[in-house]
Image (tube, rainbow, N blue to C red):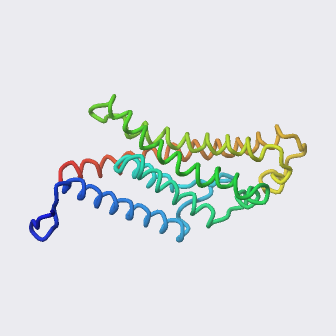
Amino acid sequence: MAKENKGRAIGPDGKRRVNTTLMLVQLALLTAIMLVLNFTGFASFAIGPVNMTIMWIPIIIGAIIIGPLGGAVLGGVFGITILMNMGALTQIFMGINFPLTIFFTVIIRGVGVGFLSGLLFKAFSKIDKQRIWSFEATALLTSLLNTFVFITGTALFFGASAELYKWAPLADIETESRTAVFGTIFALVGAQAVIEAVFCTIISAIIAKSIMTFLKKT
């Protein structure tokens, strides 16, 4: 039976209860940040033809400080916001084969990559005992992994569809070969991936390190 300790119910699993509460608070806070970014329009911004998103920053932070479960939940939130925004490419994908393929390239991608991000940090932390490079490595690989999964899903599920020609960046392609179409898509996504990887790695690592240091002290 739980006993009272300074107004708080503490039982045999008191430590676990506190940790669970902290995890839920962290998840709620990071989810709120993602939703605010999404609804205010600050989640992404255009750099030429490339549309860069910063939504992976809170996901990476959650995966590091909470763990794989936190990364998975936040990755799922990311997928939901993509469906809410309904960008031009997402609309085309939904028109080609909905809901299975779009579910994979959006929801499953977010959940899976977020979960793997947490696993990556755990694995790196076992090697990097002082955590000198594990934060940066986790953030960098998470960003690149997200791009890889997206490109792979696009090629597998939408490779044979002519609907992709409706996407504005492909309008100037003279040939209708699959090589030309996907060469353009992968070039744009690749350029986006490089920018996102650099940005997310720097910001995510700095914030996650600060939070972990604070939690350790308190």
- Residue 196: % across, % down: 54, 47
**Count of labels in the image:** 0
Residue at the image position 77 percent from the left and 42 percent from the top: 182
User: Of residues 86 and 186, which is closer to you in this image?
Assistant: 86
Task: Using residue 119 as the reference point, say whether residue 169 is left or right of it.
Answer: right
If the image is split into quadrants, where does the C terminus sit?
A: bottom left
Q: Is residue 45 above or below residue 131?
A: below
Residue furthest out toward the front: 1
Residue at the image position 61 percent from the left and 47 percent from the top: 192
User: Of residues 181 and 113, which is closer to you in this image?
Assistant: 113
Q: Is residue 2 above or below residue 53?
A: below
Residue at the image position 53 percent from the left and 58 percent from the top: 78
Task: Using residue 115 as the reference point, say whether residue 101 is left or right of it.
Answer: right
- Residue 160: % across, % down: 83, 44
If the image is split into quadrants, where does the N terminus sit?
A: bottom left
Q: Is residue 89 above or below residue 173?
A: below
User: Of residues 99 and 160, which is closer to you in this image?
Assistant: 99
User: Of residues 182 and 91, which is closer to you in this image?
Assistant: 91
Residue at the image position 49 percent from the left and 67 percent from the top: 35
- Residue 99: % across, % down: 70, 58
Residue furthest out toward the top: 127
Task: Using residue 85 as the reference point, say whether residue 12 is left or right of it.
Answer: left
- Residue 50: % across, % down: 65, 52
